[in-house]
Amino acid sequence: MRNTKKLIINCDDFGQSPAMNKAIMHLLEECKVSSATIMAPAPGFEEAAEWCKRREQSNIGLHLTLTSEFDALRFPSLTGHASLHEESGNMHKTVEEFERRANTGAVIQEMQAQFDAVRKFGIPVTHADNHMGSLYGMATGRSHIPQVLRKCAKWHLPFRLFRKVHPDDPLLCTIPGVERIVAKASSLAGVMGVAVPDYLLSHPFGVNEGETYALFKQMLIKKIYNLPDGISETYIHPAVDDSDLRSRVPHWEKRVWEYKLMLDDDFAYAIKDAGVELTDYSYIQKYGRVSRVRSAWSLAKELLRK
């Protein structure tokens, strides 16, 4: 019988900076994580892509990037459409700015350009997700989920959505109406034949007041023991501790903690002791789809609800 608790640990922001690249390369080499998603517009992209090509890395996804949030680490889009940029010539700093200003046609073109940029390196893209959640419509309600799902269907890639909200999730449970949002999005994915995980397990991006590495570690290990049956994904942003990271990336401490945790024997023991099996998006590709007919029925019910 297959293990009922599957977990994907994905490293976001591959290609964002040298400190990120070094940590993610190490974790992939040591098989401490399931996968990573790469940022085609970011300044460290070519270094990351060349490494993946050289190693024939087979667990790399596309981190669709439409925002550039750090003051000391800015970059433009690949296509250069004016609606995707602020006055500095770089992509918008916030999700809200992106949602309010981005032209939908330009977003579609940029997503394709980023996919093409990764494929030019011969990297067999395994899945897609989204930097800062800019495509989800969480800031103003202007979502690009239909557009990205259409792209993923064309590319034959799973996408980071989720079917259910874990009741203990500290971030997702605070979003008003999240259950209905998730139901509509996952049903649409099903209609389009796009595979998705069952759960997404989130945690705060920055360091909370009074938080230490020990408390952070305790929190993540608790999540491992409370993992629901099904296919779950969690994401990290690991980085090595260096002067460049400290000077350019806010909340750099959390990134260093995430890197450290993946190498921590206690974390590895917790995964084994809790009966959790690490997997990757090839498993989602195989088992993450549901009936299109059932999905269409579910979507219709959600759209008709008042």
Image (tube, rainbow, N blue to C red):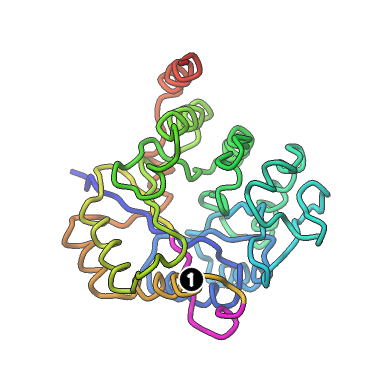
Q: Residue furthest bottom?
A: 243
Residue 298 in the image: state x and y as whole percent: 42, 20
Residue at horizontal 75%, vertical 56%? 77
The residue at which mark 1 appears reads as 24
Residue 280 in the image: state x and y as whole percent: 39, 54
Residue at horizontal 76%, vertical 56%? 78
Residue nearer the viewer, 30 or 206: 206
Q: Is residue 201 left or right of residue 239?
A: left
Q: Is residue 147 left or right of residue 297?
A: right
Residue nearer the viewer, 36 or 225: 225
**In the image, which residues are magenta?**
236-247
How many marks can you see? Answer: 1
Residue at horizontal 32%, vertical 67%? 216
Estimate how packed mark 1 is, as few (under 14), some (14 to 19) or many (20 or more) residues with alpha carbons within 10 Å.
many
Residue nearer the viewer, 56 or 261: 261
Residue 195 in the image: state x and y as whole percent: 45, 38
Which of the 4 image quadrants contains residue 91?
A: bottom right
The N terminus lies in which quarter of the figure?
Answer: top left
Whether the magenta-drawn stretch holds residue 245 is answered as: yes
Which of the 4 image quadrants contains residue 288?
A: top left
Q: Is residue 6 above or below residue 137?
A: below
Q: Is residue 234 above or below residue 121?
A: above
Residue at horizontal 39%, vertical 58%? 9
Q: Is residue 169 left or right of residue 67?
A: left
Amino acid type, callout 1? Ile
